[in-house]
Amino acid sequence: MKLGISSACLYPEVLEESIKRLCDSGVKNIEIFLNTFCECKKSFLQELKKMTDDAGVNILSLHPFTSGFETFLFFTNYPRRFNDAVDMYKRYCECANILGSGILVFHGAKRDFKISYEEYFEKYGRLVDACAENGIAISHENIPRCISCCPEFFENMRKYLPNAKSVLDVKQTIRAGYTVDEMINAMGSSIAHVHISDHNKSADCLAIGKGSLDVLSFLNKLRDIDFDGGVIIELYRENFNDFSELYDCYKYLQSIYLKSINYSTKIDSNK
């Protein structure tokens, strides 16, 4: 697994300053959240890529700010807009390729939008194929305000689109009223990327180690399904006081991950 931090944690700090701060801290894997169209310019992305390459930092995933418009872009009955939207996301694939990222995060249609799973996955499957042709695995995140809020959605996605990938977000799972185990079981081997955070009975998003999430058990469950992708800390800015607290969260995750590796090694040696 590849542990890291999302630039979204530092929003609304401008993107290049967020990336520089992450690079200077020693974090080795990041997710980039694009906040506006000008950040998709090739010259700007090349500057970010040079910054991360010089620091030895891997960009695992790209999260576009147009997530909130995906109902309108992809799931209405206006074919011309759908085709334009696919072209738009192909350009995000180009951005991801410049940055060396293999994953594009997708939220999908709003929860109250009336569409069958069959129609939804027919449309989404066309986007999956278009991104794959451009070398990128677009990966569907579980979002409470979206149709993808529940385990049932991902169980159906695996039936309709066996090759489609998922992003497991811990805080969004809790916010939607499900357990992490329920969502892992539903997504299964489709999980390509993880957004991790902690929580307790009164708060659904906390710095790791500040809540009740059994992080070791969580990592071991991912290991049980042979997950080897990114485990990226994604908090809201109000969930930590300053950057040092965010970095401490990363170091804590690293320490638990080492315990997970040791546990797995012992299990394997006893087989």
Image (cartoon, grey):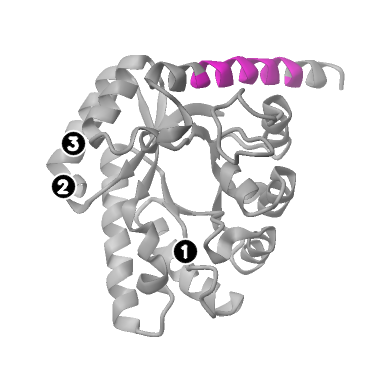
Q: Around disc 1, counting alpha carbons within 10 Å, would you say few (fewer than 14), some (14 to 19), or many (20 or more)? A: many
Of the image marks 1 and 3, the number of the one nearer the N terminus: 3
Q: Helix, strand, or loop for circle 3?
A: helix
Residue identifier under label 1: 108
Residue identifier under label 3: 46
Q: CA distance from mark 1 to mark 3?
A: 28 Å
Three-letter code, disc 2: Lys
Three-letter code, disc 1: Gly
Of the image marks 2 and 1, the number of the one nearer the N terminus: 2
Q: CA distance from mark 2 to mark 3?
A: 9 Å
Q: Which of 159 and 31 lies nearest the eye of the viewer?
A: 31
Residue identifier under label 2: 41
Q: Which of 154 and 67 lies nearest the eye of the viewer?
A: 67
Q: CA distance from mark 2 to mark 1?
A: 24 Å
At horizontal 56% and vertical 66% (from top left) the residue drawn is 147
- Horizontal side, residue 198 vs residue 100: left or right: right
Number of marks in the rendered image: 3
Q: Nearer the viewer, mark 1 or mark 3?
A: 1
Q: What is the span of residues highlighted in magenta in the rendered image?
A: 249-264
Q: Position of residue 82 (x, y in %)?
A: 34, 75
Residue that lies at the very extreme toward the right in this rendered image? 271
At horizontal 69% and vertical 16% (from top left) the residue drawn is 259
Whether label 2 touches label 1, CB < 8 Å: no
- Horizontal side, residue 118 vs residue 47: left or right: right
- Residue 18 in magenta? no
- Quadrant of the frame with the N terminus: top right
At horizontal 40% and vertical 20% (from top left) the residue drawn is 27
For residue 13, above or below residue 266: below
